[in-house]
Image: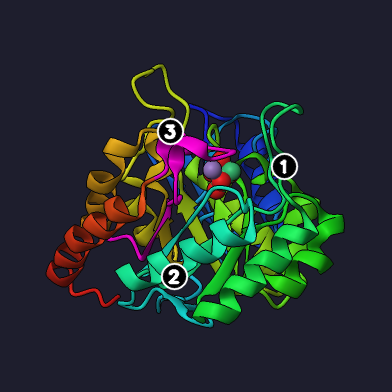
Amino acid sequence: MIVVMRRNAPEQDIQHMIKQVESLGLKPTVLRGTERTVIAAIGDERNAPAGILESGPSVDEVLPVLAPYKIASLETKAEPTVVRAGSLTVGGGRLGVIAGPCSVESEEQIVASAHAIKKSGATALRGGAFKPRTSPYSFQGLKEEGLKLLATARAETGLAVVTEVVAAEDIDVVSEYADVLQVGARNMQNYRLLEACGRTHRPVLLKRGPSATIEELLLAAEYILDAGNQQVMLCERGIRTFEAHTRFTLPLATVPYLHAKTHLPVVVDPSHGTGHTPLVAAMARAAIAAGADGIIVEVHPNPEKALSDGYQSMTFPQFDDMMTGCRKVAAAMDMQI
Ligand code: PEP
Ligand code: MN
């Protein structure tokens, strides 16, 4: 941390702050300029309680040097984390393609989806059994019955299953059936749920909250990592802005930015990110070109009849076309599917 003192700070305040830095277990190095004095506090600043130095006398500002997230940081681990769950590999040059309906609706729907997406080149099946819906009157998912149908689809196709867990009390039942636990955008800052996911042995797909900063996303991931689970994927799924032509705004700069900050693989969700089927394929290709390690998209046998998110779901032929384009971009990016 760098403690910048105010102009002409009295010597007694500088000495006080030197002692404060020492009391935090950090080593102070004092740099005296003509007008200002700066105290560099050397050591692992993340163990020092935040804010304690800011309130000191004659302190102008305190600048952190290290990222506040520790285990997620590239400073801690330089090599990329590769997440593996059955048929799905994400990171380290392997592109994960997770596809399937927003919600599991019936055996016929999920099994047909699994066969179709597999044939087109997907490497995992998505489908919500526990659905976090904006309205309590909307379809809430088939719950455990939906999980069983996902397991049937896995048994028939060999595809790994990615499904959402909305509450800590459902972790056991969801982990029993799922290969990857999805933490949805609405739950990104549900810290008890994140800790509970961190105590499981299932990889986690952590979605960015629509109003969360990237630092908040990384700190949310830190909860899972700190609880002992290192298999975490970060997912950009669009944020809320003033723009109304898309459901959310999909900021693809998140991908290279995250790669510069963390070793965790980055997945992009162009379905929720745009909210319009005709925009999804182009944004999936753009995500891969931006360096994404995976994509997650919504595909439905008949989007017009979907119980959730039909307006952003692709038909099987649309998904097949999307994959043709994605394969070309992945090859150009030296990514293997
Ligand atoms: C979903 O994947 O269907 C979903 C609810 O996504 P999000 O949490 O990103 O809104
Ligand atoms: Mn959805």
What amino acid is labelled 3 in the image?
A: Tyr
Residue 258 percent coordinates (x, y)? 39, 55
Q: Residue at x 14, y 65 (%)?
A: 328
Question: Is disc 3 placed on a helix, strand or loop?
Answer: helix
Ligand 1 image position (quadrant): top right
The label number, if any, that marks residue 115 in the structure image: 2
The residues tagged by marks 1 and 3 sit, at their Cα atoms, a distance apart of 50 Å
Q: Nearer the viewer, mark 1 or mark 3?
A: 3
Residue 102 lies in the magenta stretch? no
The label number, if any, that marks residue 268 in the structure image: none
Rendered view: 132 above or below 22: above
Mark count: 3
Find disc 3 in the rendering and name its residue.
Answer: 311
Q: Nearer the viewer, mark 2 or mark 1?
A: 2
In the image: residue 168, left or right of residue 62: right
Q: Earlier in the sequence, mark 1 or mark 3?
A: 1
Q: Which residues are magenta?
A: 290-313
Residue 225 percent coordinates (x, y)? 65, 68
Residue 272 visible from this viewpoint:
no
Q: Residue at x 38, y 63 (%)?
A: 294
Residue 284 percent coordinates (x, y)? 29, 51
Residue 56 image-quadrant placement: top right
Find disc 1 in the rendering and name its residue.
Answer: 52
Is 247 in front, or is 11? 247
Q: Earlier in the sequence, mark 3 or mark 2?
A: 2
